[in-house]
Image (tube, rainbow, N blue to C red):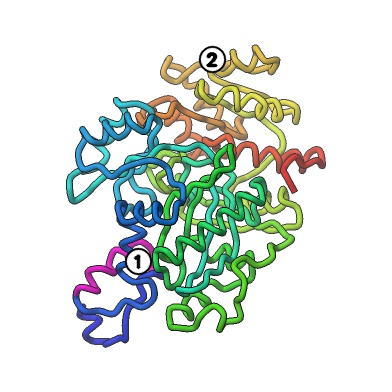
Amino acid sequence: MNIIELEKPEGIVASLGGQTAINLAEPLAKLGVKIIGTGVDAIEKAENRDAFERVMKKLKLLQPRGEAVTNIEDGIKVAKEIGYPVLVRPSYVLGGRAMQIVGNQKALEKYLKTAVEINKKQPVLVDKYIVGKELEVDAVCDGKDVFVAGIMEHVEKTGIHSGDSISIYPTFSVSKEAKQKILDYTVKLGLGIGIVGLYNIQFIVDKKEDVYVIEVNPRSSRTVPFISKSTGYSLADIGTLVMLGKSLKEQGINEVYPKEKEKWYVKAPAFSFSKLNGLDAYLSPEMKSTGEAIGYDKKLTRALYKALQSSGMHLVNYGTIFLTIADKDKEEALPLVRRFYNLGFNIEATEGTAIYLKEHGIRTRIKKKISEGSQDILESMRKGYVNYVINTRKMDSIDEQTDGALIRRCAVENNIPIFTALDTVRAVLDVLEEITLGISTIDE
């Protein structure tokens, strides 16, 4: 308030400063400060769980089932009612902090007792975890009309924070019908919540092509620079003018969704695991990336290659792959490993994974586990014998001293690309096959 009293501004814009600025809007308004653009009531409708559910029901839009709980007993009850797995997170979180997918009651109890301070003032959200494609939009609402610059599709399925996912514009795998639903939802929510300025919405499209709303952020998001550069529409300028009272139509914007670009634009996350001691490289709903890089091209595989290389991932189309795959992922991983094998890669794996691959005709060298007293896996990585590491784990495995955690840390320390999401592996294979064989299996 000292700054307010000194500068005497006409008002404060809370929707351009991320989650922290949004959280400051209400206390500033109570002190008599004018909020320019999206106001406190609209922020409350988007951020408060009960208020948001009322908006969703009124608009008849789909969202994952769930409730806000204020004690452990209610958390267990809600999870049992909606069914595991569930996504749990504190309300009003920044960067997905303390967000986790849990698959059973024991894991949920551990989370509610150790990961968060659950009470009436700090509720925890328990939502049904829906597997599907994740998409997001950045949009501008002026109170009467809505403009959506672009729809972005994530390479990784739901369960990985949007900031840690590879994001592609335009979309590459969802139907026109699903995209139209996303646009319709975006318009209804912008007007229904009362947004004046920029906002971001994240969606799930499931196997049936049903569209669910994950959340609405009543503010600018980290993807605004990416989608602005990709589409040629400066959303920051458009949104600022809207907040200052200049409508979309007055700015010459007369359509909800402009024609999509004919090039592919890819945003790849950049990580600093090697500089952050103790941070596990396993991707999850909690954001871990510290930057991003963009690649664009007329071919999607080339755009992917440019973005991944620029983000610091060293891609090679030869060498050795080391794998340790959770049982739940083995069937999905098999065709991906076969693609590496057909490209000429050597395959190494821990015993369970190796036996599974051998049973399906893939020659695999068995590596003894670290927990069995062997240092062979770690030494191979340290000596430069491993080019890629693929590691997936059980949904509720969070012990920092597991073999997987030690393998991931060693890969990071030795600058070896590590993949913990099979969707990312699939995208990388598309690139490697383009480089090696001149073929592309990804939709274009």
Q: Nearer the viewer, residue 31 or 409?
A: 31
Q: Which residues are magenta?
A: 16-30
Q: Disc 1 residue type?
A: Ala
Q: Quadrant of the N terminus?
A: bottom left
Give left or right: position of 328 versus 277: right
Q: Is residue 17 magenta?
A: yes
Q: Position of residue 76 (x, y in %)?
A: 27, 31
Q: Is residue 278 visible?
A: no
Q: Residue shown at 52%/65% (left/top)?
A: 139
| Pointer 2 residue | 351
Q: Nearer the viewer, residue 243 or 283?
A: 243
Q: Position of residue 195 (x, y in %)?
A: 42, 68
- Pointers 2 and 1 in contact (CB under 8 A)? no
User: Given this view, does label 2 or label 1 mark the residue nearer the observer?
Assistant: 1
Q: Position of residue 444 (x, y in %)?
A: 75, 49
Q: Position of residue 429 (x, y in %)?
A: 68, 37
Q: Residue shown at 60%/31% (left/top)?
A: 386
Query: Mark 1 packing: few (<14 Cα in 10 Å), some, or many (20+)?
Result: many
- Residue farthest toward the right in the current orientation of the protein: 438
> In the displayed structure, would residue 12 be above or below residue 351?
below
In space, the residues marked 2 and 1 are separated at their CA atoms by 54 Å
Magenta span: chief secondary structure: helix
For the residue labelled by badge 2, is the local secondary structure a helix, a strand or a loop? helix
Q: Residue shown at 72%/59% (left/top)?
A: 263
> In the displayed structure, would residue 395 be above or below residue 23?
above
| Sooner in the amino-acid sequence: mark 2 or mark 1 | 1
Q: Quadrant of residue 207?
A: top right
Q: Disc 2 residue type?
A: Glu
For the residue labelled by badge 1, is the local secondary structure a helix, a strand or a loop? helix
| Pointer 1 residue | 42
Q: Is residue 64 magenta?
A: no
